[in-house]
Amino acid sequence: MTENGQNLPPKYDSTAVEAGRYQYWVEGKFFEATREETKQPYTVVIPPPNVTGKLHIGHAWDTTLQDIIARMKRMQGYDVLYLPGMDHAGIATQAKVEAKLREEGVSRYDLGREKFLEKAWDWKESYASFIREQWAKMGLGLDYSRERFTLDEGLSEAVKEVFVKLYEEGLIYRGEYIINWDPATKTALSDIEVIHEEVTGHFYHMRYPLKDEEGYIEIATTRPETMLGDTAVAVHPKDERYQHLIGKKVVLPIVGREIEIVADDYVDMEFGSGAVKITPAHDPNDFEIGNRHNLERVLVMNEDGTMNEKAGKYKGLDRFACRKQLVKDLQEEGILFKIEEHIHSVGHSERSGAVVEPYLSTQWFVHMQPLADAAVELQQKNSSEKVNFVPERFEGTYLRWMENIRDWCISRQLWWGHRIPAWYHKETGEIYVGKEAPADSENWEQDTDVLDTWFSSALWPFSTMNWPDTEDPDFQSYFPTSTLVTGYDIIFFWVARMIFQSKKFTDERPFKDVLIHGLVRDADGRKMSKSLGNGVDPMDVIEKYGADSLRYFLATGSTPGQDLRFQWEKVESTWNFINKIWNASRFVLMNVEGMKYNEIDLTTEKNVADKWILTRLNETITQVNKQTERYDFGEAGRYLYNFIWDDFCDWYIEMAKLPLYGEDEQAKQTTRSVLVHVLDQIMRMLHPFMPFVTEEIWQYLPHEGESITQAAWPEVNDALNDPQSAAEMQRLVGIIRSVRNIRAEVDTPMSKQIVLAIKANDPTIEQQLKDNRHYLDRFCNTSELTIAIDVKAPEKAMSAVVTGAELYLPLAGLIDAEKEIARLQAELEKLNKEVERVQKKLANEGFTKKAPEKVVEEERQKEADYLEKRAKVAARIEELQQ
């Protein structure tokens, strides 16, 4: 790259700027962590995307925030590890592979387990390549030398280690329980893989006849097909209506089986008839009641949701077809006497969408209470040991879930995943759990199930660092990790599990901070979905506007924890911002052609504009640091935008043209140094947000080092702070803006010269304005400029008040006195409100006593300023009304 502006094209072309740049970074190994002892480690692990398809706009937001943090910390001198990886996504991936096989006319059973897994690995390799291409398009500064996959050998060892240890401690057990069953994928689901939706169903009211006597007991159910598996009717022991029936029996309609009437405190006497049917094999609450009363568990359904042989004549029917036929039969027998509409919550499989069936099954579980208790206790420690949630309110969300936790069903009836490291003896049925098969493996058969995907994902922060080898250099250097970025929708799925597993197996928090963001919604605030057709492909956005525009929009379009509305016009607005930066950079580069890095000199005599922009640069660095430390990238972006667009481009560059086009060579050289320095610092601060265009521009600037990715983050230079010059400049800008506004009001173009009189409040301000009158002449385009303390307001003139001065523009023939009075009265009203606001604040003892002295003093200065302006505006109105 050359250090001059000649080669920077006249127009910004995101495609050209971004082409080949990522390859340059990766080949340069600029993103690889080094374990340098002189640098403090900083670790961000990517939430591993599923190898089921391409990345969506939510992934783009998530990874943009991670990459901003990683790039910024790298520039701040940290040894940054931004670790890439992907998740095998058990159910989701297997469903995709099976769907593809169905298109080819085969099933996984036709292939067998080993051949099927070969197909799944082929799928993984194909989609992993696709995901890497998208990471490259997004510009993610990932260390590919450490890329991991949840099924790779190292992570598999970690999974086995955890399973075996939890089993040995009695925290993993195998048992027959009611679990969430997905009949479509024929696998168990954990509670949080079930999406509950309000649907309109029915209550079916039935009469179960008593055995050996007249009468019946009324019961109601929303799932009549499960009655075929009823083994009792329960009533409350204190319900006087039924006490004489406790211990007696009813005849189960259709089936004809005799079932007992039992007493149990679980029954709500006030709800319905006060009697409930008990189906231990098809309802979790009934399962518990069945255990208390030693009831038989009659399973009447197959794994695919069809009825089995215990359903009698309904065998082979789908559960919902069975319901329809059974209802008809019960009505004909007079058993079912009422059907009423009922809105209730029905669980659906997150993966397949099928209605989830509570189902009796033998599964593997994690006993959660001890793990949850330890994780909750961790949050009661100080901030140097606990996980810090950003925003803090999400800690409450996390804790509420942990405090109401249920045991976790971890087995899945799949082939793609971590196979459960348990073996069953072929003759004795004995269970063996271990990292390797028993020595006499021919006598044992391994469990065919695999582990829930989240079991391996829960270990991600430390399994990726080569745990359980705690002596491994990466584990020693980069764990615990520094910041996790993820959405609030997987706090339960993933964040909670990482915390309790990390606490259990490393006795450390998995990450210092967890930054929680919301969901990307469409412009109308709706959730993006295939059915609505309102999804946005981040690659389409990049193709149109470039990755930098997309990244900056995503990073600055929301506050921490809130949802983000995707709006094309806002992405376009960012693209316009980059064009502004590009054009400003071209101007600077054309005016510093041939300048070397060691020629940048900020120690020479500077004018007021130079001092002001360097002071504003310090203020911007301070604010960007403050906001990014709070992860408020939206606010950081706002400060950057205002400084770059308003201060640098619209004001400083315009003012820099005066010395640049003048005769004073020393002033030219100083201005060149300031331009280059400020533009360089802007590029560095913008780099984490817009990595491609900042690298491109920075390469043309005089610089040290090979890439901006390795450049030092800007630091405040107190020696360049000049509050007085900043105040002078603000006054000049205020005057110029006021003149431009007045011109606009009376429709006087900038090309027409004007007469301008400025009344200064004191001799110091008068002298400052005179010293800088060349700016006023140039930017106000004056034919006559008067600056004095004793300026008298001309008759029939437009006026304005700025801090420390009043302006008068005699515009005879162009002014409407009535309109000018109306304008001043509107300004007076605005100043009255400001005076009232600040005086109310200063009258509040809570503010004046508790707020820092500097803040209180600033409010007092505002009060004085507003009072002064108000008095002058009021006096001007009085003049015009005479």
Image (tube, helix red, strand yellow):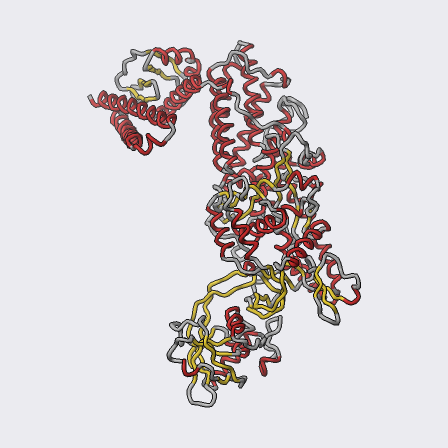
The quadrant holding residue 102 is bottom right
Q: Is residue 565 above or below residue 855?
A: below
Rendering coords of residue 292 (x, y %): 52, 73
Which residue appears at 47% of the width and 45% of the height? 562
Which residue appears at 54% of the width and 12% of the height? 604
Which residue appears at 67% of the width and 23% of the height? 2
Q: Is residue 446 above or below residue 579?
A: below
**Furthest residue in direction left, as rendered:** 882
Q: Nearer the viewer, residue 335 or 288?
A: 288
Q: Nearer the viewer, residue 392 or 631?
A: 392
Rendering coords of residue 156 (x, y %): 70, 53
Q: Nearer the viewer, residue 633 or 249?
A: 249
Rendering coords of residue 306 (x, y %): 60, 74
- Res 724 visible: yes
The answer to whether residue 314 is left or right of residue 440 is left
- Res 131 visible: no
| Numbered-mark total | 0
The quadrant holding residue 452 is bottom right
The answer to whether residue 242 is left or right of residue 147 is left
